Structure formats: structure tokens, C-alpha cells
Image (tube, rainbow, N blue to C red):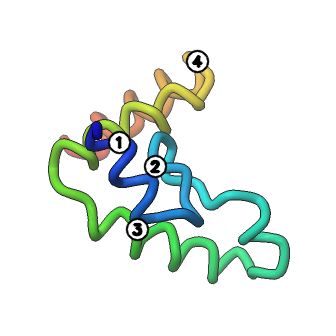
């Protein structure tokens, strides 16, 4: 069984490819509760799974917005 399948079985409330909670578990949660659950999930991942999740989440951001965020981050590091 692949690592992704094992992760999904171990975390049935979270889409392990994106780190997002499935809608059936988010209907009654506040934004703060969703954030907390997301961070708890990410914290449990190994480095490889964190990278996979980051790449999946990153792909959800439009390219132009990602470019602007990257430029802003690089400027703030100067």
C-alpha cells in the first residue's frame, strides 16, 4: 500500500494531497478551528509528505498571485 493511501486511511477527515479538510467535516467549524485542524494535520506529516502537501497547495494558487507572493517574500528577506 502506498504512503499516500496509508496517510489517507490514517487521516480520513483530511485530503492528504492538499491538506484540506473534507467538506463533511468542515460545515460546522469556524475558520480558526479549520486552521487549527489543518496545522495539527501538517504537524503530523513526515518531511516528504509535508513537501508533497506544499506542492499540492501551491498548485492551487494562480501563477500570477504566486509570483507576487514570492517577490514580496524575497523583498522582506533583504
Q: Earlier in the sequence, mark 4 or mark 1?
A: 1
Q: Earlier in the sequence, mark 3 or mark 2?
A: 2
Q: Earlier in the sequence, mark 2 or mark 4?
A: 2
User: Picture quarter containing residue 14?
Assistant: bottom right
Q: Measuring 54% from the left and 63% from the top, which residue is drawn there? A: 12
Where is mark 1, residue-wise? Answer: 4
Where is mark 4, residue-wise? Answer: 64
Q: Are marks 1 and 2 in contact (CB under 8 Å)?
A: yes
Foreground tag (4 vs 1)? 1
Left or right of residue 60: residue 76 = left
Q: Measuring 59% from the left and 30% from the top, which residue is drawn there? A: 60
Q: Which mark is residue 76?
A: none
Q: Secondary structure at mark 3?
A: helix
Q: Are marks 3 and 1 in contact (CB under 8 Å)?
A: no
Where is mark 3, residue-wise? Answer: 41
Foreground tag (3 vs 4)? 3
Left or right of residue 34: residue 25 = right
Foreground tag (2 vs 4)? 2
Q: Earlier in the sequence, mark 3 or mark 1?
A: 1
Whole-angstrom CA distance, mark 3 to mark 1, is 14 Å
Residue lying at the far top of the rendered structure: 63
Q: Measuring 30% from the left and 45% from the top, which residue is drawn there? A: 76
Left or right of residue 53: residue 12 = right
What is the quadrant of the N terminus in the image? top left
Amino acid at each position: 500500500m502506498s504512503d499516500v493511501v496509508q496517510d489517507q486511511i490514517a487521516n480520513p477527515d483530511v485530503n492528504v494531497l492538499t491538506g484540506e479538510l473534507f467538506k463533511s467535516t468542515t460545515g460546522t467549524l469556524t475558520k480558526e478551528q479549520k486552521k487549527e485542524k489543518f496545522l495539527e494535520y501538517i504537524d503530523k506529516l513526515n518531511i516528504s509528505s509535508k513537501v508533497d502537501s506544499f506542492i499540492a497547495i501551491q498548485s492551487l494558487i494562480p501563477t500570477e498571485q504566486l509570483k507576487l507572493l514570492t517577490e514580496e517574500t524575497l523583498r522582506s528577506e533583504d
